[in-house]
Image: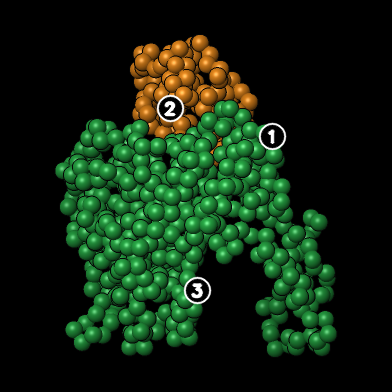
Amino acid sequence: MLIFEHAKQGRVNYAQSPRADGDLTDIPDRFLRKSVPTLPEVSELQAVRHYTRLSQKNFSIDTQFYPLGSCTMKYNPRACNTLSMLPGFLQRHPASPENLSQGFMACMFELQEMLKDVTGMQGVSLAPMAGAQGEFAGVAMIRAYHEARSDNARNEILVPDAAHGTNPATATMCGYKVREIPTDAEGDVDLQALRDAVGPHTAGIMLTNPSTLGVFERRIKEIARIVHEAGGLLYYDGANLNAILGKVKPGDMGFDVIHMNLHKTFSTPHGGGGPGAGPVGVSERLMPYLPVPMVAQSDGDEFYWLTEKERPQTMGPLSAFAGNAGVLLRAYVYARLLGKEGMQRVAEYATLNANYLMTRLTEAGFDLAFPTRRATHEFIVTLKRQEQEVNATAMDFAKRLLDFGYHAPTTYFPLLVPECLLIEPTETEAKEELDGFVEAMARIDAEARENVELLKSAPHTLPVRRLDDVKAARELDLKWTPDRT
Amino acid sequence: MSEVPDDLHYTKSHEWVRKQDDGSLTVGISAHAQDLLGDLVFVEVPEEGARFGSGDDCAVVESVKAASDVYCPVTGEVVAVNEQLADTPETVNQDPYGDGWIFKVKPDDEAAFGDLLTASAYAEMIAEDSH
């Protein structure tokens, strides 16, 4: 039910409070609106109940296990939230002069340094406002690099077929043609296809390592050599950084540019469309092009902004100010809470949890997409056999999981694997939670064989049943107007 | 097993291709492809008059599961597109080899049609895929 449907004409926030029409005589006529705005006329209590009920209908990490592969839905420590909202941070105006912003700028400088260290890159800019903007900045810098060298024949970006859809979209946005590189049967990039594809047209390759298939790219050094020898650069999509945090550095693998999704790996809130933060890190050769502003430290330990004045070759700013300050502060607190050692433990426990869950699900009779490979921080179960034998699809399992109180894993991605569930438990789940998930999956598998209709008509226990997603997409209707009810 | 009409040629990327009397080629996606994608909710057709190389992506089919590129099977010029699909993408599911056609292309080299997969080669390919 929409909040508008609770409304009654003339209802105000608190019925017993005295009412007086405001005196509007001092406002010129031409500034007065002619019609009443279409706001929901509800009482304060109705509004509170409406939104509290909505929040109770929601699946969230605060209430449920949320193994949504490729999304790293881990727990965000409350401390990050609390400390980033200290009055000194909250009330600092983004246009405040440097001498009144030294505390905030010190945090941003340290975050830049910590991200540099943990990724092995030479420079980091916190400017990008989200992962997609980080990707855009990364590929725009690759373009700037080739253009500065008048290497203008390079018009192609290589993207493995396992990539996130954002990679080809980013390359296209930056004016490149996208060439797809196939994956071999064990989930690695097909090296022969890569050798055949590179050449004087290659601007670079965009890679996620570990890949979206939940496996480490084992021949990354060879890939880096092939692409670099052809004159291209390597882009690291930081989507899966959680699996290697503090253990392996993308800089050591040979990457020239990386974007990090702080809203995944560094535990800032995500889902629901942001705000995010997608800092970029670069190797020596892309340093001049980093987006501004960045924070630098003078000899006298003063922090100051680096802008287009100090960095004339920069690709420029990406927003009116300096990134999403509140999100960056949360990431800063998270990084300081963990320290270097803690970051390593993130990767260790993220992969341990994934491998434990993978092993237990295999023992429960599920098929893996890449049975010969060790899991990274996530892995893929394929339900192709269940689909063929009893017509139970990945979507049916996903919907039935909701009845057991689990957010569904990612379904039908990556596209290469039929009837797949991409499962990412993250490092913040306890063993009991993982065991509960295995039991639920095993029970659903048994149900599929006894009475597949139970799955087909799931979910049964939620406020809404199976939605008609085809009709929703074909007859998109997002607008509500009072006239139509 | 999805229907694979004998009188058409096919591509590895699941397009079907029909040779018209005037030498142009009608292109759509196979019954197998629309089955993998599920119910389509959006089809983006190429522009008439646009030129594409063989293997270039030139149209998009989108279902609730995934968005997928449609590739031009030969090098040539787009001479007609199926405008109906903007309003009724489900036609591709209902009649993939008929009213669900996506575009027509005039090949630079008429012999290119012969290089495409035959119906039996395509049927063999999708049978292997579904092991």
Q: Are marks 2 and 3 in contact (CB under 8 Å)?
A: no
Q: CA distance from mark 2 to mark 3?
A: 49 Å
Say which of A251 and A156 sits in front. A251
Q: Residue at x 79, y 81 (%)?
A: A14
Which circle's residue, 3 or 1, is located before the other in the chain? 3
Circle 1 sits in a helix, a strand or a loop, which is it? Answer: loop
Q: Are marks 2 and 1 in contact (CB under 8 Å)?
A: no
Q: Could you classify mark 3 by the number of other residues whose Cα lies within 10 Å: few (under 14), some (14-19), or many (20 or more)?
A: few
Q: Quadrant of the C terminus of chain A?
A: bottom right
Q: Chain of mark 3?
A: A
- Amino acid residing under circle 1: Asn
Looking at the rendering, which quadrant does residue B99 occupy? top right
- Amino acid residing under circle 2: Ser
Please name the residue that numbered disc 2 is placed on.
Answer: B13
Q: Residue at x 45, y 57 (%)?
A: A426
Q: Is residue B96 above or below residue A356?
A: above
Q: CA distance from mark 2 to mark 1?
A: 36 Å
Q: Could you classify mark 1 by the number of other residues whose Cα lies within 10 Å: few (under 14), some (14-19), or many (20 or more)?
A: few
Picture disc at residue A451: 1
Say which of A141 and B122 sits in front. B122
Q: Which chain is orange?
A: B
